[in-house]
Amino acid sequence: MDELNKRFYRIGDVADILGIPASTLRFWEKEFTIIKPVRNAKNTRLYTPKDIETIKMIHYLVTVSYTHLRAHETTLHL
């Protein structure tokens, strides 16, 4: 990933950077209270580089945890 050198990123930019839908970011914002983008006067979400790093970690954990869970469930059903 390129270096994050802007102060704030909009939700579409973050979705593109991480390769996930903007709807996933909105969902995770509700599910994980650690994600707290600031909002401007137009109520647009603005993510900092630190927010993006946090979301990257959540994405990794959700992906890895889900993969391990599915593998475990498959093993139990054999």
Image: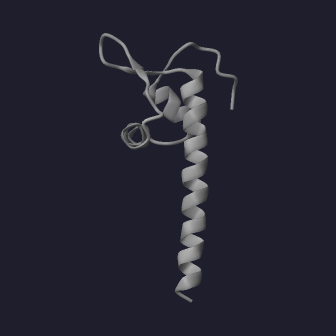
Does residue 65 sit above or below 31 in this rendering?
A: below
Residue 11 lies in what quarter of the image?
top left
Residue drawn at 46 percent across, 32 percent down: 35
Residue visible at 65% across and 15% down in the picture: 5
Percent position of residue 64, x then y: 61, 57
- Splitting the image into 4 quarters, where does residue 67 fall? bottom right
Residue 51 point in image, percent of width and height: 54, 27
The extreme bottom residue here reads 78
Q: Residue furthest left?
A: 42
Q: Residue 18 appears in which quarter of the rendering? A: top right
- For image coordinates 54% across by 20% down, the residue present is 48
Total marks placed: 0
Q: Is residue 44 above or below residue 71?
A: above
On screen, residue 51 versus residue 11, left or right, reads right
Identify whether 18 is placed above or below 44.
below
Image quarter in which the N terminus is found: top right
Between 2 and 25, the one nearer to me in the picture: 25
x 40%, y 36%: residue:
29
